[in-house]
C-alpha cells in the first residue's frame, strides 16, 4: 500500500477498485479487516471460526464489489456481510436451520417488556481505571457471550463498531425501532451483568422510589 | 415521568438524541431518583468499557494467507 492510497477516502478507493485496481481494494481491506475480524471473534468467541467468517466476508467483497452501490459506507457493507455470516455459524452450531433476523423477531421485542434493572449500585472503579485490569476483558467477553446473539450483534455494531442506529438497521435488515429495542435490552443486560461484579455491594440501592411496584 | 418511562427512553438520552423537552423531564426525574441516576451512570460506563476495550488483533499469519487468497480470487474473477 502506498501512502497516497492510505490517505484516500473509502469512496475513492471503491471507485478505483471497481475500475479494476487491486491495490486500491487491498488498501480498503487493510483499513477494515480488523473490524471485521473483531466483530466475528466477539460474535463467535472462536478464533478459527472468526478467521473463516473474515475470509468469507472479504472473498464475498471481491466477488460482489460490482453490486456495492454505496448507499451505505463500505465498512457498513462489510460488517453487514460479516454479521450475517457469523449468525449463520451460530445457528449451525445450535443445529437450527438458518432463519433471518427479521423472522427471529419475538413478541418480547417491545419497549413495554424491557426488564427493570435489579442490581443497582455505583461501580467501585471508573472505566478509566478498569481498562487497565487484565481480567476485565474476560469479564466483558463473558457478559457479551451471555446475550442472545440477536441482541449481541446489535450491541456490537452500534456501540462497539460505532454504526448509527440507521446503519445498524440497514446492516441487519431490521427496522430502526427493532434495533432500538434490541440495543436497549443488550445495554441493560450488560449493565446488569457487569454491575454484579463491578458494583459496590455496600452502595447497593433497592428498588427505585418511582417504580410502580 | 415514571422509572419505566425513563427506561424506555434511556437509549435516546444516553446517545444525546432525545427531544429537548423530554430531556428536561428526564433530568428532573434523575435529580430526585438516585436508582435511575445510578442506572444511567452504569449504562454509560458499560458502553465506554466496551468501546474503549482492546480490539481483537487479527493474527499475522492469517492476515498473510488472507491477502494471498484475495489477490488470487481477484485475478480469477477479473481475468
Image: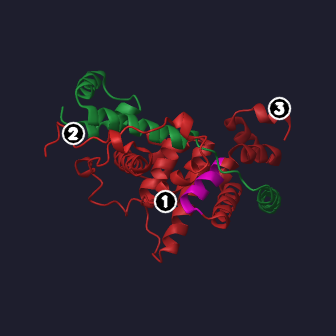
Residues A114 and A70: in front is A114
**Residue that appears at 58% across and 40% down:** A131
Numbered tag placed on residue A54 in the rendering: none
Sooner in the amino-acid sequence: mark 1 or mark 2: 1
Q: Which residue is mark 1?
A: A145
Q: Nearer the viewer, mark 1 or mark 2?
A: 2
Quadrant hosting residue B67: bottom right
Residue that carries the numbered disc 2 in the rendered image: A208
User: Which residues are drawn in magenta?
Assistant: A35-45
The tag on residue A4 is: 3
Q: Which chain wears green? A: B
Nearer mark to the viewer, of 1 and 3? 1
> Helix, strand, or loop for circle 3?
helix
Along the line of sight, which residue is nearer the eye, A13 or A38?
A38
Q: Residues within 10 Å of mark 1 (few under 14, many from 20)?
A: some
Q: Residue at x 39, y 42 (%)?
A: A200
Residue sitting farthest toward the right: A2
Q: What colour do you see for chain A?
A: red
Q: Chain of mark 2?
A: A
Q: Which percent across, then down, holds residue A132?
A: 61, 40
Mark positioned earlier in the residue sequence (2 or 3): 3
Subunit of label 3: A
Q: Are marks 2 and 3 in contact (CB under 8 Å)?
A: no
B4 sits left or right of B70 in the view = left
Query: Looking at the image, do the residues carrying marks 1 and 3 touch, with CB atoms under 8 Å apart?
Result: no
Residue A40 in the magenta stretch? The answer is yes
Callout 1: residue from which chain?
A: A
Amino acid at each position: 500500500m502506498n501512502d497516497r492510497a492510505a490517505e484516500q477516502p473509502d469512496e475513492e478507493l471503491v471507485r478505483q477498485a471497481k475500475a479494476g485496481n487491486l491495490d486500491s481494494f487491498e488498501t480498503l481491506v487493510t483499513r477494515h479487516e480488523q473490524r471485521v475480524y473483531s466483530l466475528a471473534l466477539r460474535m463467535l468467541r472462536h478464533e478459527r471460526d472468526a478467521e473463516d467468517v473474515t475470509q468469507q466476508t472479504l472473498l464475498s467483497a471481491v466477488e460482489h464489489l460490482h453490486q456495492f452501490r454505496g448507499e451505505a459506507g463500505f465498512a457498513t457493507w462489510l460488517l453487514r456481510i460479516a454479521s450475517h455470516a457469523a449468525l449463520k455459524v451460530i445457528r449451525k452450531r445450535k443445529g437450527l436451520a438458518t432463519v433471518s433476523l427479521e423472522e427471529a423477531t419475538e413478541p418480547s421485542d417491545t419497549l413495554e417488556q424491557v426488564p427493570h434493572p435489579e442490581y443497582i449500585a455505583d461501580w467501585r472503579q471508573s472505566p478509566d481505571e478498569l481498562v487497565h485490569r487484565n481480567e476485565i476483558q474476560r469479564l466483558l467477553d463473558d457478559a457479551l457471550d451471555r446475550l442472545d446473539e440477536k441482541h449481541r450483534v446489535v450491541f456490537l455494531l452500534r456501540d462497539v463498531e460505532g454504526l448509527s442506529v440507521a446503519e445498524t438497521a440497514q446492516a441487519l435488515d431490521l427496522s430502526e425501532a427493532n434495533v432500538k429495542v434490541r440495543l436497549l435490552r443488550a445495554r441493560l443486560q450488560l449493565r446488569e451483568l457487569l454491575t454484579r461484579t463491578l458494583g459496590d455491594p455496600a452502595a447497593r440501592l433497592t428498588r427505585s422510589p418511582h417504580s410502580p411496584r | 415521568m415514571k422509572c419505566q418511562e425513563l427506561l424506555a427512553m434511556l437509549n435516546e438520552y444516553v446517545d444525546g438524541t432525545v427531544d429537548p423537552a423530554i430531556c428536561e423531564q428526564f433530568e428532573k426525574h434523575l435529580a430526585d431518583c438516585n436508582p435511575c441516576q445510578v442506572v444511567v451512570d452504569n449504562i454509560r460506563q458499560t458502553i465506554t468499557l466496551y468501546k474503549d476495550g482492546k480490539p481483537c488483533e487479527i493474527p499475522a499469519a492469517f492476515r498473510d494467507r488472507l491477502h494471498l487468497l484475495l489477490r488470487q480470487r481477484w485475478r480469477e474473477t477479473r481475468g
